[in-house]
Image (spheres, rainbow, N blue to C red):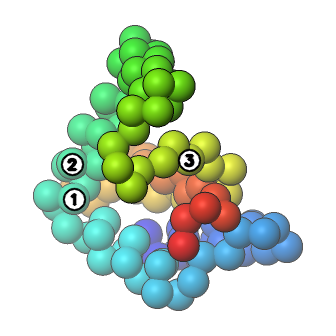
Amino acid sequence: FEAAMREAQAKAEGSEFQMTAEEQAKFARAFKDPEFRKMMAEYVEEISDPAHRAEQSAYIRELEAKGELPEGKEVISPEAGFVVKTRTGEASSKVFVNVVQSSRVA
């Protein structure tokens, strides 16, 4: 995973987005945790379902239009950053992690 992160970061050279060493370390630690990987796989499967995605998007736009977002929350539409391609441990399946950016996130 670390090598994939370094390769993706190198490809992003010159772009506005640069991931810090601390951020890279956090990703690496997280992906070593089997429970995190399981949760991430479930999340990716859920958001990949076009029906779920459209429904969730419509709901969020409705909340935003009505001014009913939870207090202290805002909708952020991130910009593309880069993709990290790696493999899982046991099954050696490919995993792609899309890293995005927004000036509204510190």
Q: Which residue is mark 2?
A: 39
Residue 59 to residue 35: above or below: above
Per the model, the C-alpha gap separating discs 1 and 2 is 5 Å
**Picture quarter containing residue 28?**
bottom left
First along the sequence among labels 3 and 1: 1
**Picture quarter containing residue 26?**
bottom left
Furthest residue to the right?
Answer: 14
Furthest residue to the bottom?
Answer: 21
- Circle 1 Cα neighbour tier, 10 Å, few/some/many (<14 / 14–19 / ≥20): few
Q: Are marks 1 and 2 in contact (CB under 8 Å)?
A: yes
> Secondary structure beneath disc 2?
helix
**Amino acid type indicated by mark 1:** Phe
Quarter occupied by the N terminus: bottom left
Quarter occupied by the C terminus: bottom right
Q: Nearer the viewer, mark 3 or mark 2?
A: 3
**74 sits to left or right of 6:** left
> Secondary structure beneath disc 1?
helix
**Amino acid type indicated by mark 3:** Ile
Task: Please name the residue shown 61% across and 61% down the image.
Answer: 104
- Expressed as whole percent of the image width and height from the top left, the position of residue 55 reads 40, 16
Q: Nearer the viewer, residue 13 or 91?
A: 13
Per the model, the C-alpha gap separating discs 3 and 2 is 22 Å
- Expressed as whole percent of the image width and height from the top left, the position of residue 89 reads 27, 60
- Circle 3 Cα neighbour tier, 10 Å, few/some/many (<14 / 14–19 / ≥20): few
- Circle 2 Cα neighbour tier, 10 Å, few/some/many (<14 / 14–19 / ≥20): few
- Expressed as whole percent of the image width and height from the top left, the position of residue 98 reads 54, 51
> Secondary structure beneath disc 3?
loop
Q: Which residue is mark 1?
A: 36
Q: Which residue is mark 3?
A: 76
* Residue 96 seen in the figure: no
Residue 100 to residue 51: above or below: below
